Amino acid sequence: MSLAFIEAEINRFLSSNDPEILCIRGAWGVGKTYAWKKYLESWIENNSNIELKYSYVSLFGLGNIDDVRFAIFERTVTGKNIIGGPNENTFNELISAKRVRSHIFNLGRLGGELLGKRGVVDIAARSAFSTVRDQLICFDDLERAKSSLDIREVLGLSSMLKEERRCKIVIILNDNEHSQKKEFYKYVEKVCDVNLHFSIDASDAISLGINNSDKCKPYVTACIEKLKINNIRIIKRISKASNRIIDILHNNHIGLLDESIATAILAIWSIHDPDRAPTLDFIRNYNRLSTLMAKGRGEQDSVDEKYIKLLSGYPYRMANKLDMAIISAAETGYFDQFAILSAAEVVELERARQQGGGRLSKAWEDLYHGSLATDDEVFYDELKASAIVEASTISPLNINSAIRVLKEGGRVADAEAVIEAYIAGNIDRGYEFFDIEKHHFSAGEKVDDGLKAAFARQRAAFTDERDPLEVLRQIGERSGWSEQDAALLAKQTPAQFEHMLETLKGANMRNAIEMLQHIGRGTSDEHKAIKSASLAAFRRIAAKSPLRARKIRGFGINLDAED
């Protein structure tokens, strides 16, 4: 059912002078209540000369029909208050109305003679419902009412209000989750004059949920339509997150906005519609190029083909550092500006380093998947050539796939040439890059032994020329350390730690000592070496005088602890 049809039917319903019952039903989050409120507000603005009484009643938590009756009265508003909703002032205005006050007073006086003070309050509350007539009433959340509230009572009350009080009734519910679904369908056709099934496509959902003036709309429309997201609550979350990303990136990283928002949309959809969307793990692990290679090697059984097909036309190729930061932000609900900006800097530096590329992808897309006429040797030659030319721009995951394919094709020497070119092309990446365990590989992806050994050799041969004292000072200053920092400090002797600790002064000394304690809680060989050497250094300093020993213990250092 199109959104235009739903809007037209709601406007017809509101403009009609006849009492009617309109039912709007549909799945969770598709925008039933949102659309009703939006079109009601629009109708009121265009018909301000019409006097209207309105009561919106959520049945969530209500347990009996008397609660429903009083809620109708209590939440009745008129005129400009319809848009704002009921509050203490609107209730006082309602009570002070001459007809209502007189009616409740007369019934209350009669009840007082028979029931006493407590009975007066009860009968006054119940009798207020008798003043409800000639008004618009919306019952929402039927599926969330207590089980003690029978659906037949609500429908019966609606019928009575229409027939005897000339009221117009709107009933909104998620009919997929209603515990009394059979009862509802049994009676709804008898009671309701119009039964709208609210089911709209992604384009209509965007029109309903995002204003044309919203700055995120140009960025999100195509992605939402591609994923066929028609849930208004999810779209609202997407809008909020996308606007936050725009605020963070628009000054210095505007070129990353489209892909960052595409990632956020995919992650938010995954979190809030798990029955239809790929999991966050799938999104984090997805790599379009490695997927093409896996398909070429006949290894795609382990990958969900439905989601691969979905993402093939979506602006998301693989998760880089910025994507990972945005996925984590979507998961926690908090978009950390510092983390996102830091990740954006890394991605842009990587892009500047690459300056082009794509030849390896084209080898797979054009020569392997795109043609049945390509000779094997032509494909292998281009795979090798493109991998060597683009060695400095290719991820370890993708170079590993190329190496494996070459070896499986009997091109072992070519595979080894690719490994050599890859190490040479990334020689300036530093110590941490060559930790193969830190790189992302798809589930089930076997790392080539030759590539693994080359990474290990390069890591072992790495020489860190930095001053250990300056590294320790910086660790304390920024309250954090890298693997490269830990590897350098792990090579320091107790005497060298002693010298560094005595050289640092003031806040630099205190911060360094605190960070050495943090590092010492780690379980890696480097962390254990740092803990042992630094503890020995503290003991050497403490042995120089009782006052120094007292100072060191004041920092929480246990000089009697085991190494």
Image (tube, helix red, strand yellow):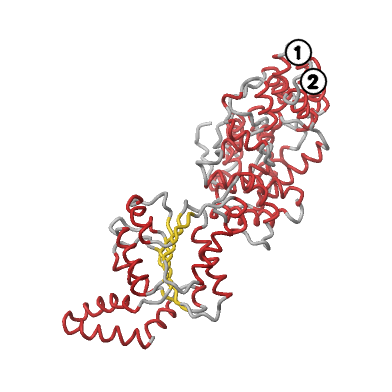
**Residues marked 1 and 2 touching at CB (< 8 Å):** yes
Residue occupied by mark 1: 411
Quick one: label 1 or label 2, which is nearer the N terminus? 2
| Left-right relation of 15 to 287 | left
Q: Nearer the viewer, residue 316 or 484?
A: 316
Q: Which mark is drawn over residue 129? A: none
Does residue 477 appear in this view? Answer: no
Does residue 358 appear in this view? Answer: yes
Amino acid residing under circle 1 = Arg
Q: CA distance from mark 1 to mark 2?
A: 9 Å
Q: Could you say where residue 366 lies in the image, as x and y percent from the top left?
A: 77, 27
Residue occupied by mark 2: 384
| Left-right relation of 459 to 1 | right
Amino acid residing under circle 2 = Lys
Q: Nearer the viewer, residue 296 or 492?
A: 296
Q: Nearer the viewer, residue 33 or 494?
A: 33
User: Residue at point 81% right, 21% down?
Assistant: 382
